[in-house]
Amino acid sequence: MAEKEKLTIVVFSGELDRALAAFIVATTGASMGMDTTMFFTFWGLNIIKKNEGGIRSKGLMRKMLNFMNRGGSKRLKLSRFHMLGLGTWMMKRLMKESNVPSIEEFIIMAKQMGVKMVPCSTTCGVMGLEQDSFLSEVESIAGAAFFLNEARQSGVTLFI
Amino acid sequence: MKADHSLDCVGLYCPMPIVKTAEKIKELKPGEVLEVVADDKGIKQDMPAWCQTTGHEFVGVEEEGGEIKVYVRKKRG
């Protein structure tokens, strides 16, 4: 292998199932020696928000948004069959029974494997999110130019 | 097949066997063979693919009952 291959994933969605797909591909890419970046934008930011702590965003509308859209990997719902939490609870249980890591575990694992998890600056601005809204495993906030610079060097780019 | 190291991945689904293999192979000396024991059928396709990308050598696969054993030789240099 000459140069290190790159994998870039845009994580736009904030559901448990889609997050799982993104992290499976990301950690596998890192295992294959690929330089892997996950660029989190819009609802995807919910995946990497802190599970604990209050709502810190400023202004009524942003406070309301982040109250309704609390985020945190433990609060993610299934994109289908959430069923007021029952479906999601069952899926999490099945995942656990099958020894599939939780999203919390995947985030730590991805970090240890050198996967870069980057929040999108525009969405952070619009939603009133700061660096300290996110887990410590998360890299510095960056913009579309950062993403495109990664993506144009990547053999594989996914939008989830 | 004879192996220098063994890794138990029984009960684990994709991507864990590959993630653990990538971690374990760091402990091996070049030329040594790692045996990965798994029961997720995907490993039969995944391990050769992982080897193709990483440059390690896929030595072979053995199957007994529901247990799958795949063998990887660590690349030199």
Image: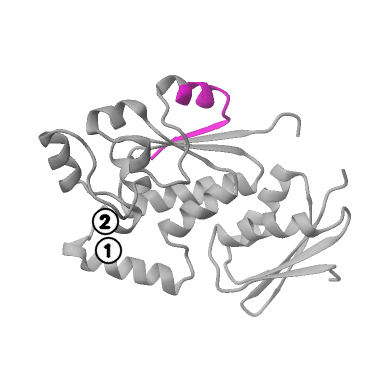
Q: Quadrant of the C terminus of chain B?
A: top right
- Point out residue A14 in the picture as x, y percentages from the top left corner: 30, 46
Of A127 and A150, the residue lying toward us? A127
Q: Is residue A13 visible?
A: no
- Point out residue B2 in the picture as x, y percentages from the top left corner: 86, 71
Relative to residue B5, is residue A25 drawn left or right? left
Residue A77's disc is 2
Relative to residue A146, is residue A43 drawn left or right? left
Residue at 33% of width from left, 35% of height from top? A130
**In this picture, which residue range is highlighted in magenta?**
A146-160
Q: Are marks 2 and 1 on the same chain?
A: yes
The amino acid type of the residue labelled 1 equals: Thr
Relative to residue A36, is residue A103 drawn left or right? left
Q: Are marks 2 and 1 in contact (CB under 8 Å)?
A: yes
> Pointer 1: residues within 10 angstroms few (<14), some, or many (20+)?
many
Of A112 and A6, the residue lying toward us? A112
> Pointer 2: residues within 10 angstroms few (<14), some, or many (20+)?
many
SS at mark 1 in the image: helix
The amino acid type of the residue labelled 2 equals: Lys
Residue A88's disc is 1
Q: Quadrant of the N terminus of chain B?
A: bottom right
Chain of residue at mark 1: A
Chain of residue at mark 2: A
